[in-house]
Amino acid sequence: MAAQTRIYRQRIRSVQATKKITRAMELIAASRVVKARKRVEESTPYALALTRACSAVATNSNTDHPLTTERVDPKRAAVLICTSDRGLAGAYSVNAIKKAAELIERLNNEGKEVVAYLVGRKAVSYYRFRRRDFAKEWTGFTDGPDFEVAKEIGDELTAQFIAGSEEGGVDEVHIVYTRFVSMVTQEPQVVRLLPLEVVEGEIDTDGDGKPDSGPLPLYEFEPSADEVLDALLPKYVTARIYNALLQSAASELAARQRAMKSATDNAEDLIKTYTRLANQARQAEITQEISEIVGGASALADAS
């Protein structure tokens, strides 16, 4: 009985140590997610306004710009998959990878070869473990991305799109990221970045999969629509990627905070269970000791 009590006490100490770690990680995520949400709120209006501006120029001009023109018989598509560098964030990375797998399957069914570009060590580990090919990786910043990384990714994907499949590039560019809705809800999203997709003068700027209502704004182009698109479209690609990275960072921190809170609550429940079992074992031990003392006293009384 004494040995069993010691085992429960050791388990309690172990769970208490784990609880301190998960509680600390929960507090860190909670403090960082506030800044991450603010960065999302600051960057989203600019990205959406830039998207609408590019869409309006592409819709109201007769210009066939390389970044807005649909390719005839597209053969290759780039997919940028945004995950986290670290774990302990629940199903955050898994959901993004599943969404990317659905997109890749759909593109393959359309007869397109998919070229994967990976953000985050979780996606890299997933692809390397399964020995799947990918073109390039970016890691080490997922919970706090900066604009320079987004520009590097945007320049790489834009260059591949301009080159086209005939020259070893791609004919489409898609991005899979996790959109931050609230602290409770984060939704994996798929957005086609290139070519810029406009349907009947409407465009999906918020990433919810539905075209926004209302007409696009009218602009006068100076000096020409070509030059305006040349200036705007690279900024559009970078801004959308940057916003997607920020959305993913906020989603990752929110998911980690929720996962660590759940782990802390589970640790508290486990400590209560082990404490009850330890008390029961101790009570059984005391009862046994009393029984032995009473039995010994009775034996001495009978002997006398």
Image: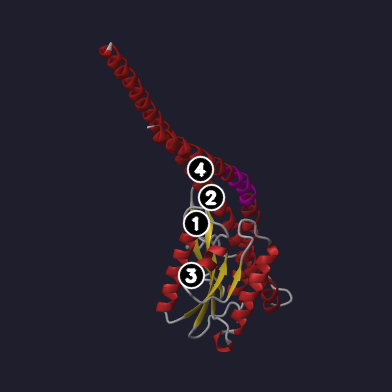
Cα–Cα span, label 3 and label 4: 30 Å
| Label 1 with label 2: CB-CB less than 8 Å | yes
Is 208 situated above or below 253? below
Mark 3 Cα shell of 10 Å, populated few (<14), some (14-19), many (≥20): few
Which amino acid type is marked by label 2? Arg
Please name the residue that numbered disc 2 is placed on.
256
Closest to the camera, between mark 3 and mark 1, is 3
Mark 2 Cα shell of 10 Å, populated few (<14), some (14-19), many (≥20): many
Mark 1 Cα shell of 10 Å, populated few (<14), some (14-19), many (≥20): many
Please name the residue that numbered disc 4 is placed on.
261
Cα–Cα span, label 2 and label 4: 8 Å
Count of numbered circles on the image: 4
Tell me which numbered mark, 3 or 4, is placed earlier along the sequence.
Answer: 3
Relative to residue 275, is residue 223 drawn left or right?
right
Residue at 56%, 57% in the rendered image? 86
Relative to residue 299, is residue 208 drawn left or right?
right
Nearest the camera: 180 or 303? 303
Across and down, in percent, residue 76 comes to 51, 81
* Residue segment shown in magenta: 26-37
Tell me which numbered mark, 2 or 4, is placed earlier along the sequence.
Answer: 2
Tell me which numbered mark, 1 or 4, is placed earlier along the sequence.
Answer: 1
Q: How is the image coloured?
A: secondary structure
The secondary element bearing badge 2 is classed as helix
Which amino acid type is marked by label 1? Tyr
Across and down, in percent, residue 27 comes to 59, 42
Look at the image and tell me whether residue 116 can be seen: yes
Mark 4 Cα shell of 10 Å, populated few (<14), some (14-19), many (≥20): some
Nearest the camera: 54 or 275? 275
Relative to residue 167, is residue 151 drawn left or right?
right
Please name the residue that numbered disc 1 is placed on.
92
